[in-house]
Image: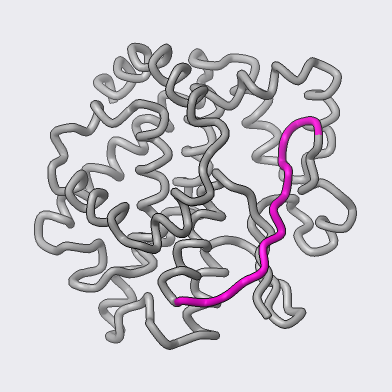
């Protein structure tokens, strides 16, 4: 039996739900309330499975698998039917050159952008004492350190300009690759597309898409990505209770972020 501990708008959880849908696997949902007030991902029970207190966590017949990129590869190993990795060694290498970006900095930079533009508003709305407790309980040190800076400084965070510069570079690289193939690792839709596609969706939800409007191959690829039935199953059907706030705060932040993008 497959069990997934996740929440609706987590990019890391979206990746796993898309992969599960692509592979047509049944799974049991454990939806966590990760709000500042509830912080179910910091509960003693959850931390036994995932000491970093992050989402998602997969449990397969009692075996706990952590870290979204590891989970993706695990699913393709454990359920090789309907593969999500190229068959050739060179194809797998091409795929992994993209997927390794997630843990090298893409996810951290995505969190910086999200916190500075949108998420800090919800965190501070909970009140200083609740926020203080949330940050004190957070096991992940890099996340805790960055969140404190980004919540305090917002769009003036010193972490925001390099995060925007990072995405501008990665998106340009993706666009160049996609000029020659429909998917990031070649002719086959793979874990590379799942892994990076959700981050494009995330930045688009912050109303940032005009920044890369000239990257036509990237935009066409993302259109193909979100048109797949697995995207509807793994992302759209779960909704996103923060949609309205993402839009309004994104519009407010666009001028500042646009300046950073153009200066990068």
Give the residues drawn in magenta, as a range: 24-37
From the viewer's side, name the closer residue of 10 and 260.
10
From the viewer's side, name the closer residue of 96 and 80.
80
Identify which residue is drawn at 51% across, 26% down: 159
Q: In the displayed structure, does residue 133 sit left or right of residue 21?
A: right
Q: Quadrant of residue 139?
A: top right
Identify which residue is drawn at 17% across, 49% down: 220
**Residue 98 vertical placement versus 25 (above, below):** above
x, y (%) of residue 84? 37, 75
**Residue 179 vertical placement versus 187 (above, below):** above
Q: In the displayed structure, does residue 44 sit left or right of residue 151?
A: right
Identify which residue is drawn at 28% across, 31% down: 209
**Residue 239 vertical placement versus 55 (above, below):** above
Q: Quadrant of residue 259?
A: top left
- What color scheme is it? one colour
Q: In the displayed structure, does residue 43 sit left or right of residue 68?
A: right
Name of the residue lying farthest toward the right: 44
x, y (%) of residue 202? 42, 39
Q: Is residue 109 magenta?
A: no
- The secondary structure that dominates the magenta segment is loop
Identify which residue is drawn at 39% across, 63% down: 230
Q: Is residue 35 magenta?
A: yes
């Amino acid at each position: 039996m497959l069990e997934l501990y996740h929440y609706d708008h987590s990019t890391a959880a979206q990746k796993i739900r898309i992969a599960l849908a692509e592979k047509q696997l049944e799974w049991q949902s454990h939806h966590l309330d990760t709000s500042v007030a509830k912080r179910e991902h910091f509960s003693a029970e959850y931390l036994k499975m995932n000491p970093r207190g992050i989402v998602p966590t997969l449990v397969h017949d009692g075996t706990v698998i952590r870290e979204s990129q590891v989970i993706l590869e695990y699913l393709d190993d454990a359920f090789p039917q309907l593969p999500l990795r190229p068959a050739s060694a060179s194809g797998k290498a091409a795929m992994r050159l993209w997927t390794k970006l997630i843990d090298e900095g893409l996810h951290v930079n995505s969190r910086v952008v999200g916190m500075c533009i949108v998420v800090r508003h919800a965190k501070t709305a909970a009140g200083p004492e609740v926020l203080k407790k949330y940050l004190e309980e957070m096991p992940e040190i890099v996340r805790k350190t960055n969140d404190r800076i980004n919540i305090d400084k917002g769009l003036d965070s010193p972490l925001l300009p390099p995060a925007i510069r990072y995405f501008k570079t990665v998106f340009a690289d993706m666009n160049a690759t996609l000029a020659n193939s429909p998917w990031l690792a070649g002719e086959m839709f793979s874990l590379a597309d799942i892994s990076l596609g959700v981050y494009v969706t995330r930045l688009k939800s912050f109303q940032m898409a005009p920044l890369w409007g000239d990257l036509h191959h990237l935009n066409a690829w993302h259109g193909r990505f979100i048109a797949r039935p697995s995207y509807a199953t793994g992302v759209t059907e779960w909704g996103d209770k923060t949609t309205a706030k993402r839009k309004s705060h994104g519009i407010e932040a666009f001028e500042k972020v646009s300046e950073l993008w153009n200066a990068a």
